[in-house]
Amino acid sequence: MGVRRRTGLFVLQVNPILCDGFGHCAELAPELVTIDEWGYPIIRTAPVSLSDTGAYQSARYAERGCPRQALRIQRFNEK
Amino acid sequence: MIESSTLPRLMHEASSRPLSLAQHEQTFAAATPIGSLLEELEASGLAGRGGAGFPTSVKVRFIHDQRSLHKYVVVNAMEGEPASHKDQSLLNTHPHLVLDGAEYLAGLVGAKNIAVCVARDNRSGINAMERAIHERARRSLRGPKLDLHTPPQRYVAGEESALTHWLDDNESLPQFRRTRPHVLRIGHAPVLVQNAETLANVALIGRFGASWYRGLGTSNSPGSTLVSVSGAVAHPIVMETELGTPLRTILNYADADSDPQALLLGGYGGSWLSGEHLDTPYCNEELAPLGVSVGAGVLVVLPRKACGIVETQRVVQWMANESARQCGPCAFGLPALADGLRHVARPTGDATLALQRLEERCDVIKGRGACHHPDGVVRLVRSALQVFEKDVARHVQGDACKGSLDSRHYAAIPQLERAEELVWE
């Protein structure tokens, strides 16, 4: 484990074409993802601070755990 | 030379046959060559006529700044909207005006290829374009290479990423774009996708300049536009109007119902406008406060005797079938919206619950597809619930209006011949 930057923001992005609604992300990152009535993820659109390490760790788990690899963490600096 | 303030610009000297190249060059003789087309485009304030209304000069500059050996200009004459006929009438009158605009832009961004896309079922449009391309091929070999492509006739096939993906990979499905603005590519070559009517306007700006172009229209949305009027009219027509003309004038000219219940503006992914706002000028800055936009220039007139909920339900049903079934919220959500509207229009069970579910689903679906197809349907449903608020309340109470039992409908829907068999290739 290297040093992780704690400044900046991230959002979890889903490619809706790849997503098949397995629902793993909602279990791995419940603070970021909820599931709609058809089983597809509704992801929090507001950017989350990287200093929220719990949320960032869950986002990483969700990204790794997606069976269709449809999730991606988009990191960006604060404007 | 066409005067700056006279109206038929795009439809100037339009006849029932497409103009040949010689006739075209005589009709639209250039006055003085303009300096820089890009600067003129910026000064003209031309907005795209395909529906989104994005400033053309910004898009052109974006592709112009891409460094690449090969670039494409794509002429989008797909016209998936069943109520819109503007591109078809443009191809059937002035195909060379569209090709001129495409050649100007190709020269500007440095494109070697122009791909003209006309939907497969539009036979007359394909014939006119084939002829026009053939005439140009005999004229010169130096210009960009013109090709005619015929993607399948589907609503989402005209979406720019679907069109690019068709040209790239023979599959007209919209693609996911992670970041915007996004450069669409065929192979490695950046692609500039423009609507046919936009290109015709570009051809006029390239000939006569920006100040001539601003002779019509308002300061924020200059120029003229093609409007397809259908619904409660004597004959569905395509007419050219100045932007900023009051809606009432357009309806009078089209010989439409002068006291309509509502108007559907912008296309089947657009929104309803209540009949009270007939004196609103037809341009984006005046319509935006009412939650409506000019969109693709569609105007469907709904008379008082019709039921807006049933009309919306039919449109949403068709739009749900036209979904590419790629994204879950669109593939499952749009049929659910159509179902919800049916429960509101002809209540069988708990209609209040159905209405509540419908509104919740609108919030859930919005913005969760790879393209804007589901967003358009949500916009249509929301505006219907707002404009036909009183009718909705009556329907929910089980007191269905007379119009909902009528078999006459006003929003044209293509027949669902083979609803299960969707063609994408």
Image (cartoon, coloured by chain):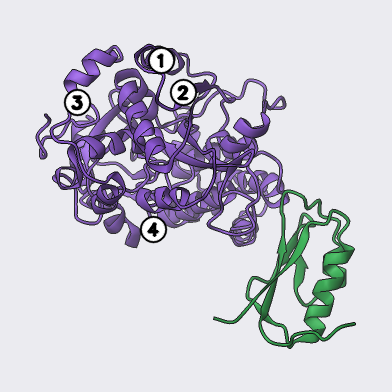
Residues beneath discs 2 and 3 located on the same chain: yes
Residues beneath discs 1 and 4 located on the same chain: yes
Look at discs 2 and 3 and give the one toward the viewer: 2
The answer to whether marks 2 and 3 mark residues whose Cβ atoms lie closer than 8 Å is no
Q: Chain of mark 3?
A: B
Q: Chain of mark 4?
A: B
As helix, strand or loop, the secondary structure at mark 1 comes to helix
The answer to whether marks 2 and 1 mark residues whose Cβ atoms lie closer than 8 Å is yes
The residue that disc 4 covers is B291
The residue that disc 3 covers is B28
Q: Chain of mark 1?
A: B
Does residue A12 sit above or below B237 in this rendering?
below
Location of residue B121 in the rendering, given as x and y in whole percent from the top left corner: 53, 18
Chain B appears what colour?
Answer: purple
Look at discs 4 and 3 and give the one toward the viewer: 3
As helix, strand or loop, the secondary structure at mark 2 comes to strand
Of A45 and B98, the residue lying toward us: B98
The answer to whether marks 1 and 3 mark residues whose Cβ atoms lie closer than 8 Å is no
Chain A appears what colour?
Answer: green
The residue that disc 2 covers is B146
Location of residue B114 in the rendering, given as x and y in whole percent from the top left corner: 47, 29
Identity, as a three-letter code, of the amino acid under mark 2 = Leu
The residue that disc 1 covers is B137
Q: Tell me the quarter of the image containing the N terminus of chain B.
A: top left
